[in-house]
Structures are given as C-alpha cells and as structure tokens.
Amino acid sequence: MRRSRVLLTIGLATALTAGCAGVGGSSGGGGGGGATSAGFGGQPTGALNIMGFGGDDDVAKARIAVFQQSAPDVTVTHNKGDFDAQQFLTALASGNPPDLVYMSRALIGSYAAQGAIQPLTSCIEGQQIDTSQYRPAALKSVTLKNVVYGIPEFYTVSVNLVDTTSLQQAGLTTADIQTKDWNALLATATKMFKADGGKIEHVGYDSKIPDSFPLWALVNGAQIVKDDGSPNLNDPKAVEALDFNLKLVAAQGGWTNFKSWRDSFDIFGDQNPITAHKLSAFPMDSFYVNVLAGFLNKGTTLDSTSVTDRQGQPVSTIGGQAWVIPKGAKNPVAACAWAKTMTQTDTWMAAAKARAATVASKNTLFTGLYTANTKADQQIRDMYVKPGKDAGFDRAIANVYTALDAGQALNPSAAGAEIDAAWKSAVSRALSGSQSAQAALDQAQQEAKAAYDKTAK
Amino acid sequence: MFLAPWIIGFLVFTAGPMVVSLFLSFTDYSFVQAPTPVGTSNYAQLFSDPRIGKALGNTFIYAALFVPLGTVVSLLLGMLLLRVGRAAGFFRTAFYLPVMTPAVAAAGMFLMLLNGQNGLVNHVLGWVGIQGPQWTTDPAWLKPSLAMVSLWTVGGSIVIFLAALKNVPQQLYEAALLDGAGPVRRFFSVTLPMISGTVFFIVITHTISALQMFDQAYTMFYGPQQKATASDDSLVYMVYLFQQAFQFFHMGFASAMAWLLFVIILVITAIQVRVGNRFVYYEGGPTR
C-alpha cells in the first residue's frame, strides 16, 4: 500500500514536470532579441528555420534562389503551408520558435503588443535596409507605436472586376459599375439579378461583404480603426456603409441564399463566377486578375473600373504579408538578411523574370507583380506589363496600378485580433437579420473597446 | 510492470496536461510571457462573457440533435448488418470506412453536398418536389446540418451495436415468437432490453463527443474561406475555446473554459448513469 502511494506520488510529479515543460515565457535565443544593430551586421551563417512560407510558386522560388546565392553559408528550412497561429504560439511557448515567420500584416499589431515578435530597429540598421523603398501604407501596417515589427512584401488592392458579357445582355455598360453613387449601384445590381424561386441564377454586384466591410467603410469616408489603434466600428459612416450592403444583399436574394450561391463556386477554377457569366461585377483583390488571365481562352470577357469613394476618387484597403522575427529566434541575423534580400528591388526583378517566363510558356498575360516595393513595382510594370492582348485585362491592370498609389492601410492595433473578430461577428449578425446595422456595430464597438482598453493597461 | 507503458503515457499525455491546464486556468497566460496569477478572475469571466452562454447553448442544441439521431441511426444500420448474409464483411467495412477519413476532408465534402443553391442534397430533394433549406447558411439549419455531417462518423457505434445484437440469445426470440410477438414487439421486448447496456454506453460516448465537437464545425464554418462569414449560431464551445487560446492569446481563460466543460460533462454523465441504470439490463444481475 505504502509502495503504491510512493509510486503514485512519483508518477504525479513526473506528470507535472512533463506537463510544465512547455509552459512559461520563451527565453531569448543565442543571438536573439538582445542583438544590437552591430550584431545584425555582416554575412549571415548557420541554419535558418522559417515558418508560414510555402515557397512553391515561380516567384517564391526565384527569390529563394537569389538569397541562396547571396548567403551560401545559410541552410534554409521552411515548412509547407501558410501561417498557423496554433503552431507558432506552441513553438514559442516551448522555447523553440522559428527564426523567421511569414504572416499577414493584419496580425502584426496583436503579435507585437503581446511581445511575440521582435522590434526590427536593430535589424534594419544592422543590415542597412532602406525602408523608404516600401510603400508608405505597407510600412504603416507593420509599425506599432512608431516601431517597425515587420518587413512588408506584396501589396493587395481592390478593383471592380466586371463581366462584360452579362452586362451587355442586360443593356448596361462597364460605366454602370461604380461605387460613387450607391443608389445607382443598387439599381444596377437589382436590374441584373435573376432568380428562379429561391435559386439564384445571376447576381448583378457582389460587394464581397462581410470581408470587404473595411473597404466599404473607407469608400464612405470612415476609418474603423483610429490612428492610435482604438476601434471606431460604429462610426456613422461605417454604419451607413453596412446599411447599404444589407440593402444590396437583400435585393439579390437575401443573405442565406446569397451566401450559398457564393459558396457554390470554385473561385479558382474555370467555372468561377466571372468566366461562367454568373456574376456581373465585384470588388476583388488584385491577384485575381492573374487567376482570370488563365481563363482568357475559356470565354472570360473581363473589364474593370476603380473602386472609388463617394467623391469619385480611387480608394482601396491593402493586404499583404510581412517577415517578422519571433522572440527567442536563434538566428535573427540570417532572418533579417533573408527579409532584406527577399524584398529588395533586384530580387523582385528576378522574380518578375521568372513569372514572365511562366506566362510565356502558358501563353497567358503578365498581369503585374505588386510587391510593396515602389521602385520594383514601377520597374516591373515598365519591363514586363505589355498591353495589347486584351483591352479589358489592360484596363484591369491599369486600375490596379492606380489603386496601388491610392491604397490605405488599416491602422495596426494592439487589440487587432479582437477588433477584427468584433466587426466580423457584427456584420454577420446584421446580415442574418438578428440585429440592425447600428445595433450590431454598437455591440461590436463595445466589445472591441473593452479589449483595446485591456491592452492599454 | 506491464501496466507501466500505459501509466506513463497517461501521466505524461493526459494527467500531466490536465494538471497544468488547471494551474493555467488561475493565470493570465499569453504563450509569450510567464503565467501571471490572477486568482479566480478567469472563472468569473466565464459567467460574464455572453459568448460563453451562446457557445454552450449552441453545443447543447447540437448534442440534443446528434445523440439520439446518431444512436438510432447506428442501431438501425447495425440491425441491417445483422441481416446481411455473405456480404457482411464488405458492408461492415463500408460502414466503418468513413470513420477512417479525415474529419476535415469529410466536412469539406459535406459543405459542397449541403450547399443550398447547387448542392447534391437539395438537388435530390428537388426530384420529389421538396425545396431544401440553405443547410450551411441559414442560422436555423446550421446545427441540424452539423448533426447530419456528424453521422458520417458513427461507423464505430454500428460495429459495437452489431456485436451486441449478435449476443442476444436466439431462444429469447423463439420464445417470443411462440407467444405470438410480432417483429416490433420482439424488438422492444427482447432486443432493446438485451442490448440496453450497449445503448447506454453509446449514448454516453456520443454525448461526450458531441459536447467536444470541434473539427467539423471549425472546417465548415471557421476555416480560412469561411471565417469572416461565420454566424454566432455556428459557434460551438470548443471553437470559442480555440479562438480564445490561439487567436486572442488568452490561454489562461481558455484553460478555465476547458475545466468548465469538464465539469459539465462530468455532471451530465453522472445524471445519465443514475437515470440509465434504471433502464439497463445487466445479465449478471444488479451490482452489490
């Protein structure tokens, strides 16, 4: 009996020790968070472990090759697949974080506020990264309280993509797809909408709500996150924008039917809603022009207009990725060197050359590469974007380049994750009809403000 | 000595983490800094956070739908399997195979099948003049559709029921036949009492797994393509726990949520055992 009690005690102690092995703050790594700018200088060596970067496509492979040539003493390993928060946080908690993480810029504020990622001041100075090469809006989205936490790459903007076939069938033109006059847009969408009972056959304008709520708020002149990172979700102009979108969805089958219709398409396949002429227009991310270029020979009849504000000036929210160095990274020098190399102009030009070769082999269009590096964007456009194959695609590409300069970042916030969740939940509640736009956004503002106030303590 | 591998595994992979999560539930822990003790404030927050109630409510409704449906469907399929002659092995495998498919893949497949506009299910219902609902977007149908998708995984229960049905002594059926009992009467008077222990076990295990629902709900409603459009009516408890832990960095609060769920499951299971013992027939007689 006594022997069993002793064994049980030893067993529980073992369990407690084993379970606690992964708990606690992560410690600093070998050259880690404490490295000075001098420590970040020089030629990188050693192993570099990257998380969240699949590196499978032609653009990524070309850039990886540039780095490997410039830093032959670095052995790079990276997992396949996108950034996974659970994977990253458990690695961090276990004291074994990757050296470099590739994540959406929208997450930077939250991770920086938690101390999960390092400020890059020393990295930028030590590796002499010229931050003026990055688009100001991209740099803003990786900066929290005047400290840069990420090196930005890629720059996704929104333009209206239009299917001219279905427009012409309805007796309309591309000019009817505009975001300045909302009453006219609602009328246009309603005119083109077709349904047989509860089954939607054609949608006139899919505003991409709820994902695009920040865009529509911006179109109406509202910023849902203020400059200091505090939420502004129930700004009257944001409420008005949501109200308009509710009307747009209600006029085109109602939310449950509309969402089911949207979900039924393979957006990356040749039966996507534009190529299949089932949707006349939507404000879509710039990368999608490249997707549609692959279906030019499948009957895609594309045209485009800019997303504009109520005064008719082009606007867009921006998306994109960033390289961040986690707390406790064992080889932050190589991580910093990688981030610098991947985002500099020469590397982007090598990537554009690889993309141009792919396009030529598949006989499609070079639709541009939007890098967040202003100089690289212009050089790539001058060298590789050749209009003339399809006028509609040419206009779409031109509108994307206009939107690059008009893009605005959502202000990063220490409570970014909670603010994001609050407005998404609010918009879903409003769309399902369980709350009005005002009530939903008021509740969201309350939740987001409470979360923001906690981070400010 | 022979139990040692299991005991070590249990201590390291189950008991150890449980003890640590209990500790974490009394702390504010964000994975980055060391846990900071906060007393019982995480537990107090469980009662003040309205989404906890919403998530629990959704989970209970889902469990109330799935448990009887899953139990009845697996019993019916088990009874069908009992009648199959030579092809029994093939059908047993066929019914069990869905259990082997990854839950994520199955959920993705069902998202397409249950699509309200162009999915196969509504297409087939249309053949008989029924206009099917928007299974995956109408808030009223989110939990029923989740319960239907969960039926994909009842293969294990079918096999267990089959074993129990095969163990029912034939002489009982013969005696009932002699007394003039029809098939329905034989089922309720012979089959059901004789397999009541198995029914009891299946109900309890289905209840526990229903209350811990995560994979299908997350894939169908909270995956990367769906996250922005997820309705509060599809928020099940484990998904909210996951969000608190890995999206909002509240691992301490998530640990408290886990212990609340543990207590709820414990209480429900205790009630089920207490009530169930009145209806379960034990061949060896009542326990002393």
Image (tube, coloured by chain):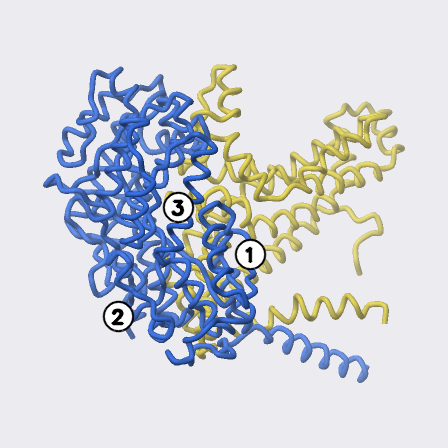
Give the SS element for disc 1: loop
**Image mark for residue B40:** none
Q: Quadrant of residue A271?
A: top left
Which chain is the one coloured blue?
A
Q: Position of residue B139 (x, y in %)?
A: 40, 38
**Circle 1 residues within 10 Å: few <14, some 14–19, many ≥20:** few
Which chain is the one coloured yellow?
B
> For the point 58% across and 55% down, which residue is it?
B268
Residue furthest left in the image: A311
> For the point 31% across and 68% down, which residue is it?
A148
Type of residue at label 3?
Ala
Q: Is residue B18 left or right of residue A151?
A: right
Judge whether A276 appears above or below A455 on screen.
above
Residue for badge 3: A352
**Image mark for residue A79:** 1
Q: Quadrant of residue A254?
A: top left
